Amino acid sequence: MGDVKKTKRRSKGERSKSRHIPERTCIVCRSTRPKRELIRVVRLTEGGVVIDETGKLNGRGAYLCRQRVCWEQALKRNALNHALRVILSADDCATLQTYAASLPERLEDPGIGRSRLPGTDNHDVRNCVEEQNI
């Protein structure tokens, strides 16, 4: 009969060298980062909104960067209300503002994606107008 080629099978402990890293998008600046670098805010099924540092709580979630600017913009523009499909209570807003105060103003690394916050290195409309001397 013909020659049968035997292939080497991987053992259970042996994995490929590059592992898939899940990415998520910040709801404010729209930058994509690895899931572990973002903070998840969750609307619980019982009601209320909590910060989920583990990323494993049940409920509708939204991701924010670990920088105060994104958190302040999310609360100011009601981005969390829209993303979580809920109206935040005064207690929830106070809890989120307290947490945001503990975060750094900005991150050094702008992330993989692009940021849409004013004052970042993006090429925004004001720069276009200045370049064209309009």
Image (cartoon, rainbow, N blue to C red):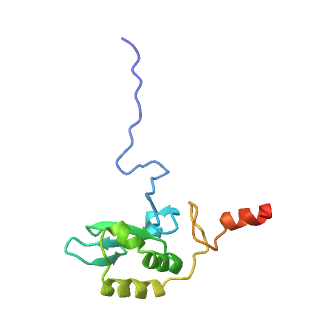
Foreground residue among 114 and 75: 75
Image location (x, y in percent) of residue 131: 78, 63
Image location (x, y in percent) of residue 49: 30, 77
In the rendered image, the vertical position of residue 8 relative to residue 74, given as above or below: above
Q: Quadrant of the C terminus?
A: bottom right
Q: Residue at x 46, y 48 (%)?
A: 16
Residue 55 visible? The answer is: no
Foreground residue among 115 and 57: 115
Image location (x, y in percent) of residue 30: 51, 63
From the viewer's perspective, tell me whether residue 47 is left or right of residue 113: left
From the viewer's perspective, tell me whether residue 58 is left or right of residue 18: left
- State the residue lying farthest toward the right: 133
Image location (x, y in percent) of residue 100: 45, 83
- State the residue lying farthest toward the top: 1
From the viewer's perspective, tell me whether residue 31 is left or right of residue 58: right
Foreground residue among 49 and 82: 82
Q: Residue at x 72, y 62 (%)?
A: 128
- State the residue lying farthest toward the left: 46
How many marks the image carries: the answer is 0
Q: Quadrant of residue 3?
A: top left
Residue 109 visible? The answer is: yes
In the rendered image, the vertical position of residue 128 relative to residue 44, given as above or below: above
Q: Residue at x 37, y 51 (%)?
A: 13
Q: Quadrant of the N terminus?
A: top left
Q: Quadrant of residue 44?
A: bottom left
